[in-house]
Image (spheres, rainbow, N blue to C red):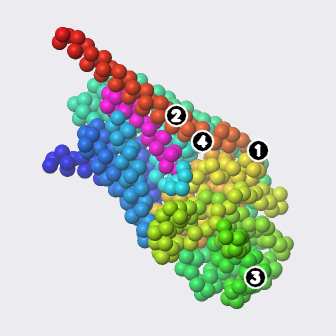
Amino acid sequence: MTRLAVNVGLVVLGALIFSLSFPSFLSTWGWFPLAYIALVPVFVLVHRANWAEIFFYGFLYGLATYALHNYWLTGFHPLALIAVPLIYATYFLIVFPLLKLADTVMPRYGYLLQIVIWLAYEYLRTQGFLGYSYGIIGYTQYLFLPLVGLASLTGVWGVSLLVAFPGVYIGNALKEGFDGFRDFVSRNRVAPVAWALCFLAAIGYGLATRVDYSDARTWRVALIQQNSDPWVGGQAAYQRSLDISTRLSREALAEDPDVEVVVWSETSVVPPIDFHFRHRTSRDSYELVEQLLRFLDTQEVPYIIGNSSARLLRNERGELERVDYNAVIVHEDGEFSDPYRKTHLVPFTEHFPYRRQLPWLHDLLIEHGTNHWGTGQEYTVFELDGVRFSTPICFEDTFGYISREFVRNGAEVIVNLTNDLWSKSVAASMQHMQMAVFRATETRRSVVRSTNGGMTTIINPNGRITAIYPPFVEGYLIGDVPVSAEEWTLYLEWGDWFAWVMVAVAVSGLVGATAVAILRRKRSQGFDSERSD
């Protein structure tokens, strides 16, 4: 019973420290130094647990960690707080045995392989339909800008490596208890020295490569935070959101006539403007669109607007079918641009490609109010008065590859339109925003976030948050955004190369170390057999 209690205690402690290193229910900004020891309980547990137990503890750790870290998911969808922890419980059901295997086949240097396995796991879980970036340990460092600068070389993954190492190392040093700590450190004293040198080099690199944009052009923006949730649905909610957005826009422009562009958040206007103006299938929606158009006709500055987009496309049966997209449009001089349509959708709630294979799950999602969107195909770059910009929508700014593609296509500024109001949680909004800091440093481009509730923010190309508006209140944020087009980074050139190196080393290291361990065991058994003969 004592052994079980200690192991469960390690699970709870590990989940708690990990969660508190991010913005959480206890700290708005997060306690990022905790990240350096967050994995200590994990690697003590991996060694303590036997093979019969390791799967259970992996499952339990994933469940506890993401229930604490993403507790705010209850506001996203009734099933989300069940689904996400269960998904990560399943991931750790696999990852913990792999960490245990590294510890078993490499008793002395297994911790080096364990670090690489952890990095490979962090990257692979951002891929595919279930891709999800919340909880990558490198993101905890978003306030430690000299270290964050490393992301321009390696993406967030290099930062994760430097943050994860102390926890993995100390966890392994304590795996035989405090009595074995000194002996472990004595036998492995080169590794922490190498880590310290790499850490200092990363900080030096971050300081030396800061972007000097003092002579760069600035783009004066007004970011409208209407504090009205389009998820509420219905004509009254849509009308209220439009009324607030137009009123705040007038107030912002009256306060500062030098504003060059006004930005409204994700789905700040819900009825598809172009569709309802052309087809007029709904009188209420048409009247709302017409009201918006009358307002825009009075405006002398361009507007970037989060708006759903709709097209009539032929389905597999050859019938015309309406397909809706989460989209962004730009209005300038009485004209609307073609929309940017969201390319990376939120799994389950915005996108479910397995309707044929799992019809019962699809029907369950629809019954619980999900709104499945069509998937966009183009990385659109808009231009206003010589400023080229792209508009990842909400969830999209949590993935480095999307902003990278925008910049490679010519974007000089990243303008993220987000709806985080549904969460009713400052921690959720802060966890989302901290990832945007890395999008700025990876690409060395300014990031602007216009949200309907939080966090409305301006981030410069060095990852510094230069302006932020209080969450979950009506208002607007006016600020100058540096327009940077000259900087080019290794991340822009090679993308997630560092993460793929970690995956390759993890796979080859596990296979190679296991094969060597098996051969040694066979030789040992053969030697013992010869001696007995």
Q: Which residue is mark 3?
A: 279
Which is more N-terminal, label 2 or label 1? 1
Which residues, given as a range, are shown in magenta? Answer: 102-126
Q: Choose mark 1 or mark 2, whichever is in front.
A: 2
Q: Residues within 10 Å of mark 4 (few under 14, many from 20)?
A: some
| Residue that appears at 58% across and 52% down | 399
Q: Position of residue 395 (x, y in %)?
A: 57, 60
Q: Choose mark 3 or mark 1, whichever is in front.
A: 3
Q: Position of residue 349 (x, y in %)?
A: 52, 67
The label shown at residue 496 is 4
Query: What amino acid does circle 1 point to?
Result: Glu
Q: Which residue is mark 1?
A: 486
User: Is 403 part of what is drawn in magenta?
Assistant: no
Q: Does dot 4 land on a helix, a strand or a loop? A: loop
The label shown at residue 420 is none
Residue 109 in view (yes/no): no
